[in-house]
Image (tube, helix red, strand yellow):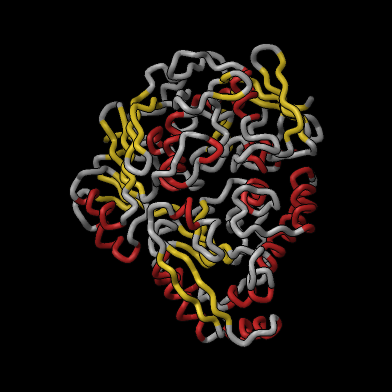
Amino acid sequence: MTLVRDDLLGRRGFLKTAAATAVAASLPFSAARAAPKRGGHLRIGVGHGQTTDTLNPGLWEAGFMIPWSFGVHGRLTEVGPDGSLLPELAESWEASADATEWRFKIRKGVQFHSGHELNVQDVVNSINFHRGEGSASAAGPIVAPVEEISTEGDDTVVFKLSGGNADFPFILTDYHLAICKADGDSIDWQSGDGCGAYKMKSIDFGVQATMERNENHWRDDVAWFDSFEMLALVDLNARTTALVSGDVDAIDRLDLKTVGLLGRRPGVKIHSISGTAHYTMPMDVRRAPYDDNNVRQALKYGINRQELVDKILFGYGSPGNDHPIGSGQRYFNSELERKTYDPDKARWYLQQAGIDNLKVNLSTSDAAFGGAVDAAVLFQASGKAAGLDINVVREPNDGYWSDIWMKKEFVFSYWGGRPVEDQMFATAYSCDASWNESFWCHERFEELMVAARAELDDGKRREMYWEMQDICANEGGSIIPMFNDYVFAVSDRLGLPDVMGSNWDLDGNRFMERWWFA
């Protein structure tokens, strides 16, 4: 066995030795903080939440259950504020020379809220929960390469993979892969019993959730609030009013056209963080006319991306290029031709499809993201010059993710991105992925995805990921018109670290651990 090393994994943050991980675990955020203190009840309004939410970790989605899960549950590894990989419930790990076998040493002394002490069987059952043909978990595709999970002694879990995966420890940061208490051959997810920094006090799906600090948490440098409460305020005006009136201390997903005015209000501070977040418009490629790539390309050239960035994001973002890899990621294809608004090219693609004009329905709702309805109307206008007749269908906010997303043939969606390319592709673009929004399946793309995750030569790996981005952009089933910054507002009563996470909104959705009342 060889210890994980930077030349093997090639990513900042993969810690070089077990000793290094142990040191890092004790000092992940201290350099960025200015004397945080304990106390107080945090109230936060989020533009997410629906009555169909669940405590089942395989089905968590959107910005209500994700932060809830980070507060209540722990995972083996964690993405730090600077994007590096940090140990969480695993205090160290090591890989075989070909990265097909990984050993994780489990942290001692970690207790669930019920008092049960974390053990290796909890870890085995928690990952197995997402595996297998019968799994409905959204994390199923990213753990599919795990062929066997075993234990060594009372502190080590061994993962044997079907092929090498240099990013495997990063994969285990996925929010679905919470470590829950073992229950027979499965896990106890129904009770909400976790080993995170906060204990669940109450939850009313689509309305609110309240958590209290776990006094027996294994770390003493997180969770500064005595308790925190999340309110599902999907309506943008309700969210903004709640912050201005002092009913909540922070909100996400601001009205970007008025963010300047909001920031001038006494007691309000605005924060903007760039990362991998992006908006998508998946087309169900199983249905006509989206089964014709010429039609998909016509739609991609018929949308004015820069106009959306200017009028919907108000500059808080950048145009997308129909693949989900951000410009700051390691294997971003910097040489791929960038699509721009081109009505003539869109008409040419329609001609290749044998049609002069295309009429389609586009389902949208501000539940997808603030401004999604306006974005659809702008697309409707720009599409006219390209021979595209886009009928905008405004859908209700509640139930959008259960009744519209992946049900209607052309919709709006959003993604926080993932820290490594393989995780993003496997989660949403693999043939069998539960969250493959467009139901797109491409044989060459699939081959490259498997080969790239096992390739340890950095140059060869880059070539594969570059080709995958090209295939996704020019043959894929989703328009990805723009990458959005995370823009949120907080009360000046709050203390925030100097460096905040960009892997999710609201400081990597770990605000409950990292923020405090100043």
| Quadrant assignment for the C terminus | top left
Question: x and y percent of residue 50 in the render?
Answer: 40, 46
Q: Picture quarter containing residue 137?
A: top right
Q: Picture quarter containing residue 373?
A: bottom left
> Viewer-proximal residue, 236 or 20?
236
> Viewer-proximal residue, 308 or 137?
137
Question: x and y percent of residue 57 in the render?
Answer: 53, 35
Task: Please give left or right for residue 503 compared with residue 220 in the image.
Answer: right
Task: Please give left or right for residue 401 compared with residue 493 in the image.
Answer: right
Looking at the image, is 96 positioned above or below residue 316? Answer: above
Looking at the image, is 181 positioned above or below residue 344? Answer: above
Looking at the image, is 360 positioned above or below residue 332? Answer: below
> Viewer-proximal residue, 500 or 196?
196
| Quadrant assignment for the N terminus | top right
Task: Please give left or right for residue 264 compared with residue 201 in the image.
Answer: left
- Whether residue 98 is visible, yes or no, is yes
Residue at x-position 45% and y-position 13%: 115
> Viewer-proximal residue, 75 or 125?
125
Residue at x-position 51% and y-position 63%: 411
Q: Picture quarter containing residue 288?
A: bottom right
Question: x and y percent of residue 234 in the render?
Answer: 34, 52
Residue at x-position 57% and y-position 19%: 183
Question: x and y percent of residue 296 in the render?
Answer: 63, 72
